[in-house]
Amino acid sequence: ALMIHPGPTWGSYSTTNARESFLVEFHGRSSHAGAAPEKGINALEGILLTFQGINALRQHLSSEVKIHGIIKHGGDAPNTIPAYASAHLYVRAPTMKMLQETYVKVKNIVKGAELQTGAKSNVTRVANTYANKIPNKILSDLFRENMLLLGIDYPEEKETKTSGASTDFGNVSQIIPALSAYINIGDVVLHSPEGAKATGTSRAYDVMIMGSKGLAFTAIDLLTNADKLEKAKTEHKDLANTK
């Protein structure tokens, strides 16, 4: 499997994080926040305690593990105890094992917040689990050779780089040899307004065409060179067995 993705640099010999995407919900009981707060159950406090628990957990996690998210709903009016609150959270980790271990810890934090507040909680996956991407040096080197032939000053990559991002392409890489290459659209931060604007420039279009040609030439190399293809398969099998 071969693909390209816009980025601030050239590169293809990299991994990505496994990821869980999930919704945390708390259901409480509304009441007047000034006149009868004791009659309410504050669902927002469940969300806030969840974030506090996650912050306390961070010191016990590997620096490679990331947990981040947003509060989607925190109530409807300041004078009403929120009966419903929710947050959308991600957990990311270098391996599926680390991902699931951390995901369980976060769910336990949610249970603790439920006990503290009395609000009922739900944790629901809102997207399929993304596996970590398995890199392939054979494919990466082939792609680099073709980009050099196309006139791109493509860097040599001796060591695997780790990206903090996640992709469903990681699931593909668990099954077959895979190449996910970054094409350099400029010195921008991805998932920012500047990054979005950069994807529409003539430079981005030009490197997209060059990257597409690089993928096509790499595919031709694999179709016409059985030895390279088998080496890519062997490397994948060896790495997949260690994940």
Image: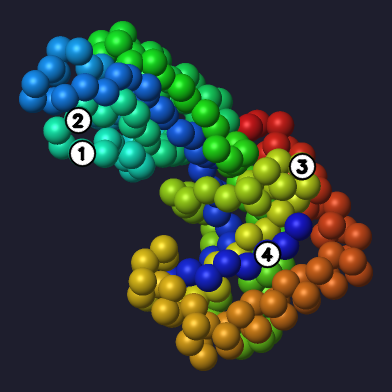
Residue 151 place in picture, x, y as percent: 61, 88
Mark 4 is on which residue type? Met
Which is nearer the N-term, disc 3 or disc 2?
2
Q: Which residue is mark 1?
A: 77
| Quadrant in the picture for the C terminus | top right
Mark 1 or mark 4: which is in front? Answer: 1
Left or right placement of residue 171 versus residue 206 in this view? right
Residue 188 visible here: no
Question: Label 2: few (<14), some or many (≥20) within 10 Å?
Answer: some
Question: Label 3: few (<14), some or many (≥20) within 10 Å?
Answer: few
Residue at (76, 57) in percent of width and height: 1
Residue 35 place in picture, x, y as percent: 9, 21
Which is nearer the N-term, disc 2 or disc 4?
4
Mark 3 is on which residue type? Ile
- Discs 3, 2 touching: Cβ within 8 Å: no
Q: At numbered mark 3, what does the secondary structure look like: helix, strand or loop?
A: loop
Q: Which label number is shown at residue 175?
A: 3
Which is nearer the N-term, disc 4 or disc 3?
4
Q: Which residue is mark 2?
A: 80
Rounded to the nearest angstrom, the CA distance separating label 2 from label 4 is 50 Å
Q: At numbered mark 1, what does the secondary structure look like: helix, strand or loop?
A: loop
Rounded to the nearest angstrom, the CA distance separating label 2 from label 1 is 5 Å
Mark 1 is on which residue type? Ala
Residue 143 place in picture, x, y as percent: 68, 69
Q: Which residue is mark 4?
A: 3
- Discs 2, 1 touching: Cβ within 8 Å: yes
Mark 2 or mark 4: which is in front? Answer: 2
